[in-house]
């Protein structure tokens, strides 16, 4: 099986030594005569390129691989990063490496696979399979999907080994043979484990094993506790996100739309980071009552609110996840402020509950109690809070559908494959990073809500580090108090060149 087979998810043809077969060409591709191939294969400077610096934190990636090795002794482990995904026909979404693969290697290139083969004396041999790159055959200029003159050079074997510190780097063409040997070994020893869903070719090559799901679970649970470098990366992503929110406030000009908001924030994400960490939610007016509104096709209207839920994903792939609800006119109306202050109170009290040893769900319980009592005081909930909060009723959820926390890190909803007893039903511990994000959402057609509140959706979200003696709000510098939000808007607009 050639390396092209392992890249098949991106529809890449086999590496051609001469003119590609007619069926592998698109209708607009030119022909490539042998004379051109012969001409293109010679006359290139072979001078060595600049030295490659090891990826930042290379020793931490190695320590993670060692911890994984200790967790699964005598078992072959296969962790692919995935491939570019088709957006339409022969165009592709921007590649984002698989979280688990990146967590173990720091490698951001597509198609690569980490294989850990058990050694007889204990531990694992680490093999990183990569595209060899270079200009050995015509594919470097004929393959517009992967050729380096079309999409840029790959690091290749030697440079990948220098950058990622993995003991052995091999060309992807050798991967099938290694996987076959891993399967043969596992027939007499413990089974191999494959992180499934990232490479169809690997999934087909290795028979499913009961241990595959456990590999994904262990990798998720390893990420529950962030080290100092990970927290530093999250701080950087949050600082960029803060600047992105400021960009949005400065762009609240007449005729602006949700699409303007998305574009302005996403510019900051691409300038300072890898991308946005998730689809930006720029929800104005009643759109804010749709929890994951990403169509972003509405107008910004004076007197309404803008719920902006967005995060910059750093070049190291750690992402912020921040929500602020902003009065488009610059000032909250009295009904808006009443609801905003209720949500903010729920958030602050929920955040105060974050400390080591408490249930992960405790901040949620605190926030739901505050919101339910507030809804009753406003006359929106007509039953006493103790009844509305009963597990067999949960009537408050008509106005707040989601829990207030999830883990945050390389994924916006990080550690999603962890066992519930280690996550949702587990205890908070120092080094965990989670969101605290209560919200209230009053649908425009909800007749149980007084008319002055209908169409209001408010969420306030911060990213919180559990410390040994409590917590730290990593996004505390982003204004959230209503007076501070209004002052922030005024200062941003006065400094904007648009005004």
Image: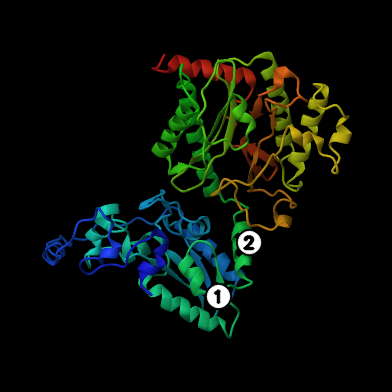
Q: Quadrant of residue 51?
A: bottom left
Residue at numbered disc 1: 207
Q: Quadrant of residue 406?
A: top right
- Vertical comparison of 7 with 368: above or below: below
Q: Which mark is residue 119?
A: none
Mark 1 secondary-structure assignment:
loop
Q: Which of marks 2 and 1 is nearer the N terminus?
A: 1
- Residue 405 in sight in this render: yes
Looking at the picture, tell me which residue is in the foreground, 228 or 216.
216
Residue 368 is situated, as x and y percent measured from the top left of the image, at 77, 35
Distance (Cα) linking label 2 and label 1? 19 Å
Badge 2: how crowded within 10 Å, few (<14), some, or many (20+)? some
- Residue that lies at the very extreme toward the bottom in this rendered image: 188
Q: In this view, does 54 lie to the left or right of 378?
A: left
Q: Which mark is residue 217?
A: 2
Residue 316 is situated, as x and y percent measured from the top left of the image, at 46, 48
Q: In which quarter of the image is residue 444?
A: top right
Looking at the picture, tell me which residue is in the foreground, 361 or 379.
379
- Residue 460 in sight in this render: no
Badge 1: how crowded within 10 Å, few (<14), some, or many (20+)? few
Mark 2 secondary-structure assignment:
helix
Q: Residue at x 76, y 36 (%)?
A: 397
Q: Is residue 313 left or right of residue 158?
A: right
């Amino acid at each position: 099986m050639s390396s092209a087979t392992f890249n098949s998810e991106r529809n890449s043809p086999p590496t051609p030594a001469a003119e590609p077969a007619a069926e592998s060409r698109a209708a607009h591709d030119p022909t490539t005569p042998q004379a051109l191939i012969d001409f293109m294969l010679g006359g290139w400077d072979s001078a060595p390129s600049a030295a490659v610096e090891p990826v930042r934190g290379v020793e931490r990636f190695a320590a993670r691989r060692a911890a994984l090795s200790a967790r699964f002794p005598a078992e072959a482990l296969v962790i692919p990063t995935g491939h570019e995904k088709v957006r339409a026909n022969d165009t592709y979404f921007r590649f984002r490496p698989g979280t688990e693969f990146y967590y173990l290697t720091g490698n951001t290139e597509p198609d690569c696979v980490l294989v850990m083969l058990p050694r007889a004396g204990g531990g694992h041999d680490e093999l990183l399979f990569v595209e060899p790159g270079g200009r050995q055959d015509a594919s470097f200029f004929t393959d517009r999907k992967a050729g380096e003159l079309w999409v840029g050079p790959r690091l290749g074997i030697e440079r990948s080994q220098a950058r990622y510190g993995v003991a052995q780097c091999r060309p992807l063409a050798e991967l099938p043979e290694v996987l076959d040997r891993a399967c043969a070994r596992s027939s007499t020893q413990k089974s191999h484990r494959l992180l499934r869903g990232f490479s169809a070719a690997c999934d087909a090559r290795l028979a499913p094993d009961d241990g595959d799901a456990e590999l994904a679970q262990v990798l998720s649970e390893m990420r529950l506790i962030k080290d100092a470098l990970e927290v530093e990366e999250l701080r950087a992503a949050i600082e960029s996100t803060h600047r992105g929110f400021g960009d949005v406030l400065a762009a609240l000009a007449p005729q602006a739309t949700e699409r303007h908001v998305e574009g302005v924030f996403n510019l900051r994400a691409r300038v300072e980071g890898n991308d946005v960490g998730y689809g930006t939610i720029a929800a104005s007016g009643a759109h804010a009552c749709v929890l994951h509104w990403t169509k972003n096709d509405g107008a910004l209207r004076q007197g309404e609110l803008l719920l902006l839920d967005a995060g910059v994903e750093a070049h190291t792939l750690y992402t912020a996840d921040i929500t602020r609800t902003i009065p488009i006119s610059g000032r909250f109306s009295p009904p808006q402020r009443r609801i905003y202050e209720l949500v903010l109170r729920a958030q602050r009290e929920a955040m105060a509950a974050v400390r080591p040893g408490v249930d992960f769900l405790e901040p949620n319980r605190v926030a739901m109690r505050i919101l339910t009592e507030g809804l009753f005081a406003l006359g929106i909930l007509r039953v006493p809070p103790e009844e509305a909060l009963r597990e067999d009723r949960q009537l408050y959820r008509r106005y707040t559908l989601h829990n207030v926390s999830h883990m945050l890190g390389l994924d916006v909803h990080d550690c999603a494959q962890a066992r519930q007893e280690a996550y949702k039903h587990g205890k908070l511990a120092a080094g965990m990073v989670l969101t605290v994000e209560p919200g209230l959402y009053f649908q425009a057609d909800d007749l149980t809500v007084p008319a002055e509140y209908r169409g209001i959706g408010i969420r306030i979200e911060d990213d919180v580090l559990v410390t040994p003696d409590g917590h730290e709000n990593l996004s505390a510098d982003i204004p959230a108090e209503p007076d501070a939000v209004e002052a922030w808007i005024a200062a941003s607009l006065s400094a904007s060149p648009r005004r």
